[in-house]
Image (cartoon, coloured by chain):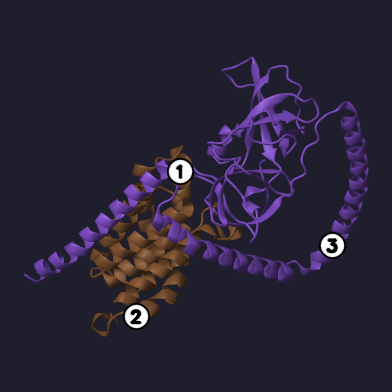
Chain colours: A brown, B purple
Amino acid sequence: MFWLYLTEFVLAMILGAGQFAWPTWLRLFQQPPDLAAILLVIVGLTRGPVEGCWTGLVTALAIGSLGSIPLGGLFVGYMGAGAVLGLLGGRIFPNYIPVVMLVTVAAVPVINAVELLFLPPASLGPWLTGTVSRAVISGLVAAPLVALLRPLMYYLSPASQRQT
Amino acid sequence: MRIDTTARQNLKPLLLMAAVALVFTVWQHAAWARDRISLPEYICQMLGGPIMSIATSINEVVRDTGRSVFLGGSLAAENRRLRQERDELLREKILLTEYFRENKAFREKLGFELDQQVKDIPARVVGRTSASGEQRCRIYIRVPPNREIHKGDIVRDAAGLVGRVIEVKGKLATVLLVIDPQHGLGARVQRSRVEGVIKPAEQWHEGWPDRLSMQYLRHNADIRIGDVIITSGQDGIYPAAIPVGVVEAVDVPPEQTQTVVATIRPFVDFQRLEYVWVIPQP
């Protein structure tokens, strides 16, 4: 289990940094995908609320530290989303990539809306456009990322907890 | 019964993590209040900085390879055009060097103090916040080994002014861009020497990205479309004569008839920043 938690921390750092260094020519309306949210969805749906919450903690810390963003809103948004996704894990089909894509598209605006309460934007219009763009591009990027990360999560999981 | 046990088992680690999050948040606020960063943030930045550099390098390799493959045919033409431009610029440089020497001689004769020659520090852009829809317009730069930059240093690229360093952590620095809503600077029209204050344009919020607005200009100010705007050096932050942008429109705000507002298109393409120069402040 230790390796799984450590891997989730390392992945959060890589994806958090990747989010900031995301190439401008691959952005949708100047918005990069929320790679941290995608990781959160994958871990939350497959590993349950505790690991979902842990992933939320480390992804929020990575994003907040690298972007010099206040951590309070990020923690509430990401940890809350991780825990809720973990509780949803048994009720939907996390092994289907389209399901993960759709959950990502839904999760990104929810996380952004929670952050909005803590850090209000200058005006709502661009925030809305940015959030929708980010949700769409996150959903698209989720597909290859799920294909990449799911086997890793599977092999790091204890044999008794492996979902087929 | 089993559900209760599982929920109780889950509750303990969840509460523990919530407590950790609370501690990190308070720690961050306390550190920021003292203009520093907390230890967890520092560790994450030390780990994340190199990852951002690697990701940027990979991005550049992919983009350049893609360009070579898809734009191979036009490269020769572009090469010819660039050679012509280089020759023209060389001629211009010779002329400007001549003017500079002449100016220097005049200044010495008049007893003006000459500016100190400082070496600009090249730095690489390794990350950025989203340009639209967020409160912050910042980039993250990484300076080469053996060079040091400080808070308040000015950042520019070959085209013009980019912003200023607001935070330095090791070799990673945060730069506040001139298009950030919190930013302002003193500027003047290069041709007529009319001065004003530059802020991000209101249209920035209406989906007209990366435009600046020159304000506090009198209604009869000599400013035209196409005029070049440079820093005035009057704000105590930026040195004079750094190119900022070009006037794109001059309007009279509906509520004020005594002033005009100019919309400035910055010379710098903030979406395509790769390398910048840091000008150390004395």
User: Any mark on residue B79, and which?
Assistant: 3
Chain label for disc 3: B
Residue displayed at 30% across by 68% down:
A45
Image quadrant in which you'd find residue A157: bottom left
Q: Is residue B227 above or below residue B156?
A: above
> Disc 2 on helix, strand or loop?
helix
Q: Disc 3 marks which amino acid?
A: Asn
x then y, percent, for residue B78:
82, 60
Give the residue at mark 1.
B35
Label 1 in the same subunit as label 3: yes
Q: Quick check: B105 left or right of A104?
A: right
* Quadrant that contains the N terminus of chain B: bottom left
Dot 3: few (<14), some (14–19), or many (≥20) neighbours within 10 Å? few
The residue positioned 10% from the left and 69% from the top of the image is B5
Mark 3 and mark 1 in contact (Cβ < 8 Å)?
A: no
Q: Check the image and name the residue furthest to the top.
A: B258
Q: Measuring from the top left, give residue B80's x and y in whole percent.
A: 88, 60
Mark 1 lies on a secondary structure that is loop
- Label 3 sits on a secondary structure element that is helix
Q: Chain of mark 1?
A: B
Q: Is residue A129 above or below residue B41?
A: above
The answer to which of B264 and A8 lies nearer the viewer is A8
Residue type at mark 2 is Leu
Q: Quadrant of the C terminus of chain B?
A: top right
Q: Which mark is residue A156?
A: 2
Can residue A138 be seen in the rendering of this structure? Answer: no
- Front residue of this view, candidates B265 and B38: B38
- Name the spot of residue B124 as percent of width and height, x first: 64, 57
